[in-house]
Amino acid sequence: MLELPELENDREVLADRFAGAQITGIEVTSSKTFQIDAEQLRKEVVGAVVWFVERRGKHLLFHLDNGKRLVLQLTGAAYLYIGTLEDMPDKSTQVRVKLGEQILYLIGLRSEHLKLMTVREVEELFGGLGADPLDKKLTLKRFIDRFAKKRGAIRPALLDTNVLNALGSAYVDEILFRAELLPDAKIPLFEPATWERLYEAMHNVLKEAISNGGAGDFPLTADDRHTGGHKQKFRVHDREGEACLVCGSTIDKLEQSGRKAYYCPGCQKDL
């Protein structure tokens, strides 16, 4: 799974290792991975310095000193690994980025999930997306305003990328549990206190998951013991039939908008 906490964990590690590093080589082993040919990519990227690494929604952006941005989208089974020629992942890699003595391996990428873009192209790509849940500009009032046109259940609305970006099923389940709200709680019935609980729960759940390294399946380096540390801390997600750790009720599941939603019938309510 790759949601906001997992990508933020990746961003922190990449920024710590590669901010200020020069790209000394790049190898594309799958022509379907990139939108330009490998030779043009090498001309544009090799020799450039990574100024910093940014996360926007579910994308990671490498800001280069030549004004370009390497934009990476990690979905499905895709993941990153940092190693050397001797310390390589045991799965085939689509892209290898050499930064000094270290190599960033990109594994399991889908077509068009790595792009070289200008600043203008980046702004066009992300301009129509919803707010980032951890954006400091997303105050409680602005958070509530983003749901103003919603009349249905809260869970599908939280997953709507036009409302909020970078949330997925796992953390929405956990956020709703922390906010004591059922997945099918109706938005028009929410009271001010309901919105406050939901807003606070979103921040607390995401920040705790980030501090624990997210719930990713793959370590970023051979000695990485931090990534994935939050996987055992889920309270309801993927725990159908197990006892709630808070009230003892049995965790239940429902199908909602084609997705599985996990919840505690004892802890969660309509308001």
Image: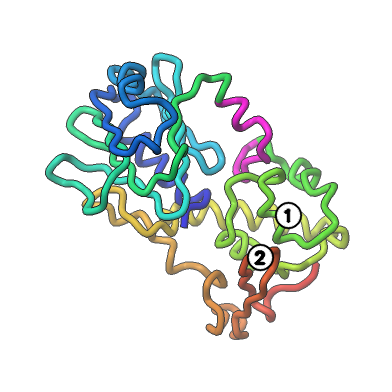
Residue at (50, 37) in percent of width and height: 55
How far across and down, in percent of the image, does residue 71 sit? 46, 32
- Element carrying mark 1: helix
- The C terminus, quarter of image: bottom right
Image coords of residue 244 (percent x, y):
57, 80
Q: Crowdedness of circle 1 by 10 Å Cα count: few (<14), some, many (20+)?
A: some
Q: Nearer the viewer, residue 70 or 12?
A: 70
Q: Amino acid at mark 2?
A: Gly
Mark 2 — residue?
258
- Count of residue discs: 2
Q: Nearer the viewer, residue 2 or 75?
A: 75
Q: Is residue 217 magenta?
A: no
Q: Is residue 22 above or below residue 171?
A: above
Q: Which residues are magenta?
A: 122-136
Could you say which quadrant of the image residue 153 lies in? bottom right
Q: Which mark is residue 157?
A: 1
Q: Which mark is residue 23?
A: none
Which residue is painted at 44% across and 30% down in the image?
Answer: 35
The spot of residue 261 in percent (x, y) is: 63, 69
Q: Residue at x 29, y 46 (%)?
A: 81
The answer to whether mark 1 and mark 2 are in CB contact below 8 A is no
Q: Is residue 113 above or below residue 182?
A: above
- At horizontal 51% and vertical 68% (from top left) the residue drawn is 234
Q: Position of residue 28 (x, y in %)?
A: 30, 34
Q: Three-letter amino acid code at disc 1? A: Ala
- The residue furthest top is 66
Distance between mark 1 and mark 2 Cα atoms: 14 Å
Secondary structure, magenta segment, majority class: loop
Asked whether, in this view, residue 107 is left or right of residue 230, the answer is left
Of the two numbered discs 1 and 2 on the same chain, state the one appearing first in sequence.
Answer: 1
